[in-house]
Image: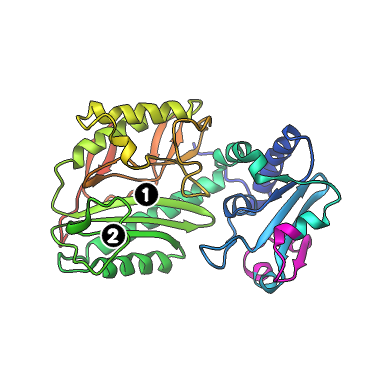
């Protein structure tokens, strides 16, 4: 039976307790949250941006006697009306638009604040174990992202341009209230590029679609192929299976990373293929939280979101999953997409055009 979903107030209380432990471990001073991932996680998934490429429009000072939200004055009314919980508005400090909210929070404090950079690993650990409400919001997001990929793929043809495919993906995400953080498209002439920003090139006989979409602060990452199958499509699934098999609550991220990287040789790729592109890692309120490198030191938690990203020239697989004591739970799944079973999981294959 799934756990009962916590109310937003109960979620906030749990997160306050987690941050209290972080503060105690760092000496007990107030903590200043400034990043999109930390603020959105703490404030129930609010949208913290105006420009996706810009800094957050607010900073949060967390202290024993409660929180203070330092908000750019020109954004405050909108955040109160559309993003913040009612109680948050009572602790809001308006900051002139020309002053950084983080700087204003530091100036207003009587003591030196703990910066995010000082407790980065501890904050990742605080975010890692998703609460029941977050899990449900993530499931809904994952379903929507997967359905957008399927719906758009059904409209594509070899003559479709990469830009038109990208536009359709972004429109589909936006229609479901999902912010398109990343949309990549590679047609047959560009499938060797692993981060292919879309161009005017036609998709041709085989194309890769990649999206990262954010809603309620959570980010779902997924990759799909359309057109004819690639020669390494199923072998790359064997590499992903090695990552999944090693990703278990209580284990170490570095050990899961090493096991997945070893999977390249086991699947008859070059042993050092993993060096040619990042392999993904934990996700959630950041696209990768953190990107796995082999020397992160993080512990894998129950209800920890992951998006491993194994790839080889012309081959790649990526989905957002939840790691639980019962195994891997794929969040970005759509039963309409053709799949094969690997390690007990349905994994995506290339989807022929016109289907």
**Residue 323: x percent and y percent?**
44, 35
The residue at the point 67 percent across, 46 percent down is 10
The residue at the point 23 percent across, 50 percent down is 192
Quadrant of the frame with the C terminus = bottom left
Name the residue tied to disc 2: 185
Crowd rating for badge 2 (residues with CA inside 10 Å; few <14, some 14–19, many 20+): many
Label 2 to label 1: alpha-carbon separation = 18 Å
The image quarter in which residue 340 lies? top left
Q: Does residue 149 appear in the picture of this structure?
A: yes
Residue segment shown in magenta: 79-103
Residue 276 lies in the magenta stretch: no
Residue 332 is marked as 1
Residue 243 is marked as none
Task: For mark 2, give the secondary structure.
Answer: strand
**Residue 206: x percent and y percent?**
17, 56
Left or right, 204 with reference to 307? left
Please report whichever mark, 2 or 1, sits nearer to the chain's N-terminal start: 2
Task: For mark 1, give the secondary structure.
Answer: loop
The image quarter in which residue 309 lies? top left
Left or right, 64 with reference to 184? right
Of 216 and 238, which appears nearest the observer? Answer: 238
Of 139 and 208, which appears nearest the observer? Answer: 208
**Residue 59: x percent and y percent?**
69, 57
Please, is residue 261 above or below residue 8 in the view? above
């Amino acid at each position: 039976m799934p756990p009962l979903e916590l109310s937003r107030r109960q979620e906030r209380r749990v997160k306050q307790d987690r941050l209290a432990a972080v503060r105690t471990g760092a000496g007990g001073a107030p903590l200043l949250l400034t990043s999109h991932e930390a603020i959105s996680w703490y404030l129930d998934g609010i949208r913290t941006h105006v420009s996706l490429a810009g800094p957050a429009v607010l900073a949060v000072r967390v202290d024993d006697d409660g929180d203070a939200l330092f908000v750019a004055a020109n954004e405050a009314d909108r955040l109160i009306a559309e993003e913040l919980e009612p109680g948050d508005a009572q602790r809001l400090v308006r900051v002139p638009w020309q002053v950084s909210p983080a700087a204003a929070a530091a100036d207003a404090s009587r003591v030196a604040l703990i910066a995010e950079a000082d407790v980065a690993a501890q904050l990742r650990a605080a975010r890692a174990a998703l609460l029941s409400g977050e899990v449900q919001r993530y499931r809904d997001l994952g379903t929507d992202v997967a359905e957008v990929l399927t719906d758009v793929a059904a409209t594509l043809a070899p003559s479709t341009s990469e830009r038109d495919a990208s536009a359709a993906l972004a429109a589909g995400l936006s229609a479901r209230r999902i912010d398109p953080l990343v949309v990549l498209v590679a047609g047959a002439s560009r499938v060797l590029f692993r981060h292919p920003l879309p161009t005017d090139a036609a998709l041709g006989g085989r194309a890769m679609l990649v999206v990262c979409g954010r809603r309620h602060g959570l980010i779902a990452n997924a990759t799909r192929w359309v057109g004819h199958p690639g020669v390494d499509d199923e072998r790359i699934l064997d590499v992903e299976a090695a990552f999944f098999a090693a990703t278990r609550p209580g284990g170490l991220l570095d050990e899961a990373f090493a096991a997945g990287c070893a999977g390249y040789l086991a699947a008859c790729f070059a042993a050092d293929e993993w060096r040619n592109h990042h392999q993904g890692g934990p996700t959630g309120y950041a696209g990768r939280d953190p990107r796995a490198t082999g020397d992160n030191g993080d512990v894998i938690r129950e209800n920890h979101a992951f998006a491993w990203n194994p790839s080889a020239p012309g081959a790649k697989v990526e989905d957002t999953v939840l790691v639980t004591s019962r195994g891997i739970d794929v969040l970005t799944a759509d039963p309409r997409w053709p799949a094969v079973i690997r390690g007990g999981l349905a994994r995506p294959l290339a989807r022929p055009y016109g289907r």
